[in-house]
Amino acid sequence: MHLEFEKWHGCKNDFLVTWIQVTDKDLVVPSLQRQATQICDRSGSGIAADGILVLITKNHRELFPEELVVINSDGSLAKNCGNGLRCAARSVLRKMDAGGMLPADLPPALELRIQGRPFWCKVFGPKGFIGVDMGSATIETIGPKHNIRKQLDAALEKFQIKQPHGIYKVDVGNPHLVLLGLTPDKGSFSAFAKSIQNLDGWDGINVHAAAEEAIDDRAVKSAAKAMNISVDPFWTALPWERGVGLTQACGSGAVAIAAAISADDGMGENQAWTAIRMPGGDLFVQIADGNHVLAGPAALAFTGSMEI
């Protein structure tokens, strides 16, 4: 079967985006899951991506999808993906533009559904930043007396990673373990993250290390000005995603980190935005009315076709 695709990235967290009709879903999605490892391979035999986004419409004339399926590079399905949502939203806007819709006719926000859960996306600022309402977060403190803390501490010691000043499990539709106060070596951190994937009955978990930095940064200030937002504080982070490994960025991970930061210092809702720099670029999170809004760029790299 022949599929057209677009290659998008959000802070270099990259995805193949393809559009299909609902009548082809039961054929195409399982096939892409089986072939995801090969398709996403970066050694030269694949197209290279962190995942595959499948936008599903009722028919070929529809400009707006009724469902978004997120496939990780190992073929597993994701319940949430902040960078993927922004890339998918930009693809929808691109299709609407190609279909002749005028800017005045575009909806103020786009609703994308992943496994039945709605996410609202909108253009944020004049330079094409996309904001996504990521919903609420459930936060669990992994304190010194937590039943898995000894195992986590043993793994940190094994891979020679210093003790973080706070450890939190954050669920934003998918699970994240956030370690605050760390700037670890990438190799050691990757090995650590892989080693703890099944603690406490976890069926894999995303793992992130983050540390606060000085706010005086030109790129952060420029992006904040473009989106007309104020930023405080500024953190750097290293993301590790289940089913993928170390990535350039993780949108839902940025939300989980911001939620953990708020829980750690007790500041609760932040009318200012938290800037989180990942290897691929900067993401911004605001917590208001119990919801977490993620904002950042999404850019088209190229288009192509593949046989599955």
Image (cartoon, grey):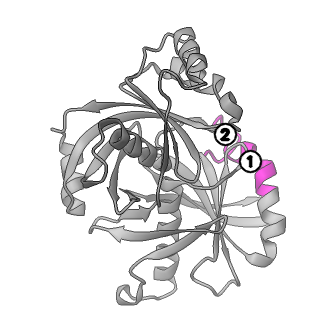
- Kind of element beneath mark 2: loop
Q: 2 left or right of 71?
A: right
- In the image, what residue type sits under mark 1? Gly
Secondary structure of the residue carrying tag 1 is loop
Could you say which is closer to the camera, residue 300 or residue 252?
252
Q: Which quadrant is home to the C terminus?
A: bottom right
Q: Which residues are magenta?
A: 31-49
Residue 306 versus residue 111 in the image, above or below: above
- The image position of residue 218, as x and y in percent, is 18, 43
Q: Is residue 143 left or right of residue 16?
A: left
Q: In the image, residue 16 lies at what x, y percent?
A: 61, 56
Q: Are marks 2 and 1 in contact (CB under 8 Å)?
A: yes
Does residue 308 appear in the picture of this structure?
A: no
In the displayed structure, would residue 105 be above or below residue 233?
below
Based on the displayed image, in which of its 4 quarters is residue 201 positioned?
A: top right
Whether 190 is among the magenta residues is no
Q: Indicate which disc residue 75 carries.
A: 1
Would you name the residue on which mark 2 appears? Answer: 243
* Residue 256 at x, y percent in the picture: 45, 45
- Cα distance between the residues tagged 2 and 1: 8 Å
Of residues 265 and 173, which is closer to you in this image? 265
